[in-house]
Amino acid sequence: MIREKRPLLSRVADSVYWMGRYIERAENVARFIGVNLHLQLDLPLAPAHQWQPLIDTAGDTEIFKEKYGEACEERVIHFLAFDDENPNSIYSCLRFARENGRSVRETISSEMWEQINSMYLQIQLQRTNPQHDALPEVLRGIRMACHMFQGITDATMSHDEAWHFLRLGRMLERADKTSRILDVKYFILLPSFANVGTPYDDLHWAAVLKSVSGFETYRKQRGRISPLNIVEFLVTDLEFPRAIRHCVNAAGESLRVITGPSDGALKYRSEQMMDVLRSELGETRMDVVIRSGLHEYLDGLQTTMNEIGDGLTHDFFGLRPEQQPARARIGQ
Amino acid sequence: MRFDSYQTDGFHDEMFDAEGIPRPEARLLLETIKSLEDGQLESSQRAAERLLLRMGITFNVYGDSAGTERIFPFDLIPRIVRAEEWDWIESGLKQRIHALNEFINDIYHARKILKDKVIPEEIIRSATFYRPQCEGIHPPLGVWCHITGIDLVRHGDGRIYVLEDNLRVPSGVSYVLENRDLMKRTFPSVFEGLRVRPVADYPGKLLETLEAIAPGGTSGTPTVVLLTPGMYNSAYFEHSYLARQMGIQLVEGRDLSVQNKTVFMQTIKGLRRVDVIYRRIDDDFLDPEAFRPDSLLGVPGLLEAYRSGNVALANAPGNGVADDKVVYAYVPDIIRYYLGEDPILPNVPTFLCWKDEDRKHVLENLDKLVVKAANEAGGYGMLVGPHSTAQQREQFAMKIEANPRNYIAQPTLALSRVPTMIEDHMEGRHVDLRPYILFGKDIHVMAGGLTRVALRKGSLVVNSSQGGGSKDTWVLSRSAEAGTL
């Protein structure tokens, strides 16, 4: 006998959504650091120059400056990977993900919980005993563990409303992170726009692609490195899993399942905003955007996605603010 | 891992008799252990502990820095109970629960037992967990104690005694279920040979119990939820575990609200009605309108909804009146009064400090007795006389004089022991046993329960907060015993 479908608690939806976001955030930060470590080996520039942009990508410029002052490799890595006072460090993300996961243990599968708990115990260990030479391997381990979590989630959890909230969180977070890395890197690389084609410039753009695991796909699709092509690829591609448009579409699909069949008019505020964003991303031409200002465009995207997040809180989570589950603010 | 140097030290040992000969029910297990290669048992033990940590089967320690999580230490050597002895324990537990339920119901209604002067009225009036708010309430099926974890101990005389009743919100059953899983992985062949009675039916029976008390007029399957204080509670693992095992929702107070004396939960599609709440929150924090007004964990208006019969609560608020250790002393009288039977399971002899004569005896013998606060649990507020310092005894003497009603004393029991892995060898450690009893349409006793073990050498305190651990409890089925003889 099949029981009546269990309605999803607002609090649980909220926690699952944030769990999805935090795991995704941890994975992205690990990838950013890893790519930068790798990149600096190829560059003749003073290393410090390479590390500040990473802080800017994470959106934590102010907190960092206050606590650490000048950016250098050691400080940046500690701040982004292990600092418990940085709410967006890998450590904090995994801790918040685990707290959220723990608060909904009866909703997620035991395998998911075991994975999330292992990740947390692992980074706790690495945090107390950081070893510089092992760092690339540690970061790779974190990335793979996050991928594994996604795989375990898709394979062991019923694809019900809670799963869709998790995917919604994951996809919005991913879109946000892709927009941020593009924004920061484009800003830095802009002065050298005239020198497109020099080996160092190519290395930087390749690093941007590698930061989102998109280098190989890009090569297959578009061949030569070109800023316009890269921006187009990362913003409007439908198939590449970290392209903003792909992520927003996937988030939109999940939201559609959550809201259920509609007879024409969209009932929820978040759904309406998501719908507008999806069609905009389909219609925007990147050469026009670049001419009028990519930074302003990406900034606008991030704001819209934050508003969608607020819309979800309003439409579904509906809790008083002081009772929200463990989390930090998005980005800034 | 051998038993060569194992000593029973004059205590009743659950595995060996006084001459050091293995008891018949333990032989197969001992043979299996002896057949293991050196170090195999230790590595199984470590693997089990790693697994517990990885699965996050931990409890939070109060008074420790925030967020400290520890695994509840687990020892691989089980406690074995013979079928015949278990049958006797089971009938005793059923009898006790039946009588206690009659008692609580009587206290909140006619109070016949007080009028007949079997128990002094003053005892009830001064009981910390007596709840005047619950007077006149008729819980569904007339049941007040749906889930109980009665603590049993075996004394040096070989007899089993009831130590505490734990009627309010007993915890620990999830460890029983998880321990059994671990044991089946470690000793598969022993399980095959011994026919250990299963415990895995507990979540199903619990759900049955909860569904049975749904308010009348519930259409279809009632909506049952488990109410937890939240993830920082020491028993949160158990709350989420039981909710998962039963397939019911785990809710917090903030998920629930009361409208028109009906309880609802907040879902993404609006409010949904709730019929039965298995609450793991103490009475005090359940409803700020009825009990403590500063409670943030509870649900305003819950008691009124319950009183109106629109929602069922398990356990019933107010049932803690029977958890008072002074009331405990009267349980044998309670059994005789309501059932007209002699108690099957004996109480530990108890001195009540509010009686002048008893108090005098207690104060003169503090170094020999165990003194307990009447309304504490978890091993807090307790003096173990033979292990105490003169200063501690002096403090307790003052506490007793200041508030005699709140203290009882019992002889220091020589709790029975079970071999326990200490580093690379076996030593005897003291144990108790907490079986879980469900009461819905009828009374169901889990086959076994939580064996708690005092891991510190010589210690008699088995609580998890005080250095205790746990063991699996193997209740043998009748056919298995016939096979070993």
Image (cartoon, rainbow, N blue to C red):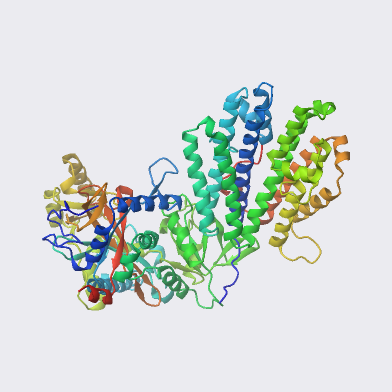
- x, y percent for residue A268: 74, 57
> In the rendered image of this protein, does residue B93 appear above or below residue A239?
below
**Rendered view: B328 above or below A127:** below
Can residue B163 be seen here? The reply is no
> Residue B304 at x, y = what percent?
49, 65
Left or right placement of residue B307 versus residue B421 in this view? right
Q: Residue B362 versus residue B228: which sits nearer the camera?
A: B228
Count the numbered circles shown: 0
Question: As rendered, which of B425 and B302 lies closer to the eye?
Answer: B425
Which residue is situated farthest in the top direction here? A46
Where in the figure is residue B464, as x and y percent of width and height?
Answer: 33, 51
Q: Position of residue B316 (x, y in %)?
A: 41, 66
Q: Residue at x 54, y 52 (%)?
A: A101
Where, quadrant-wise, is the C terminus of chain A in this rendering? top right
Q: Is residue B4 left or right of residue B107?
A: left
Q: Residue at x 47, y 54 (%)?
A: B229
Location of residue B326 by image quarter: bottom left
Q: Nearer the viewer, residue B324 or A282?
A: A282
Side (left or right) of A214 relative to B8? right
Q: From the viewer's side, name the closer residue of B338 and B14.
A: B14
Q: Is residue B27 above or below residue A141?
A: below
The answer to whether residue B269 is left or right of residue B29 is right
On the question of residue A118 being in view, the answer is yes
> Which quadrant would the N terminus of chain A be assigned to in this image?
bottom right
